[in-house]
Amino acid sequence: IEGAGRVKTVALDKTGTITRGQPSVTDVIAANGVSQDELLSLAFSLEQQSEHPFAKAIIGYAKSLGISAYDITDFEILPGSGLRGSINGSIVTGGSMEFIDGIAAIPKEMKLYAAELANDGKTPLFFASKDKLMGFIAAADTVKPDSAAAISRLKKMGIHTVMLTGDNENTARAIAKQAGIDEVIANVLPNEKEKAVQSLKKDGKVLMVGDGINDAPALT
């Protein structure tokens, strides 16, 4: 408690900390002749192995449409990047635009559209089968009712507020603006969150607020 009185900076995770952590699907954009049902089925298959709030949004949406999932083997969570598994021997992946763009080239037009959605506070999650882009699914979370008030009180105490998130910068800035956050550090992997906290500590004592596996290094 005594140490908390000397805090100069509060670093906050975004999803489930500043936001409710209860996102819903807003857009389903298929690519390369893939149907929306095919995209949703692949996404459902991967995401049912994950505990992330966005996974739950996709699972709920797919189930509401009667979409079925494939059996997944060799499933992996790639912290800060996405998910990977195998369907009938074919590698399938899901995650951030940067991660999937390194596996299956994303057209410029689709990147621009995803950026527009991100500017509205939505998070686009891309999916690929082998090296074929399947498309992306966007989900939106909402800021907790008390987040802006809590952040305002911290700022009145002279505390600098920072959002630390693995989400893309456009989405992060849209949410930060709603909550009144001073600074945004986006597109960071779990180990990069830790480095960001170490850097912020140069200006004084730091309080980190977060949850889940991605925040564990920074919380430690």
Image (tube, rainbow, N blue to C red):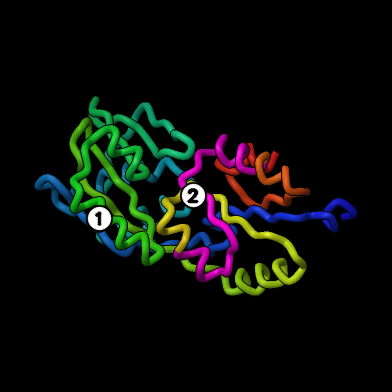
Is residue 180 part of the magenta span, yes or no? yes
Q: Nearer the viewer, residue 69 or 134?
A: 134
- Coordinates of residue 130 in the picture (x, y in percent): 22, 31
- Magenta stretch? 174-197
Disc 2 residue crowd, few under 14, some 14–19, many 20+, Cα 10 Å: many
Is residue 99 part of the magenta span, yes or no? no
**Residue at the (40%, 58%) spot, across then down:** 170
Where, quadrant-wise, is the C terminus in this rendering? top right
Q: Residue 132's mark?
A: none
Asked which quadrant contains residue 74, the reply is top left
Query: Where is mark 1, residue-wise?
Result: 112
Identify the amino acid type marked 1: Leu
Residue 80 in the figure: left or right of residue 38? right
Up-down: is 191 above or below 167?
Answer: above
Q: Nearer the viewer, residue 136 or 200?
A: 200
* Residue 37 in sight from this viewpoint: no
| Helix, strand or loop at mark 2 | loop
Extreme left residue here?
33
Asked which quadrant contains residue 97, the reply is top left
Q: Nearer the viewer, residue 66 or 165?
A: 165
**Residue at the (47%, 58%) spot, across then down:** 172
- Coordinates of residue 123 in the picture (x, y in percent): 38, 56
Residue 167 in the figure: left or right of residue 12? left
Query: Where is mark 2, residue-wise?
Result: 186
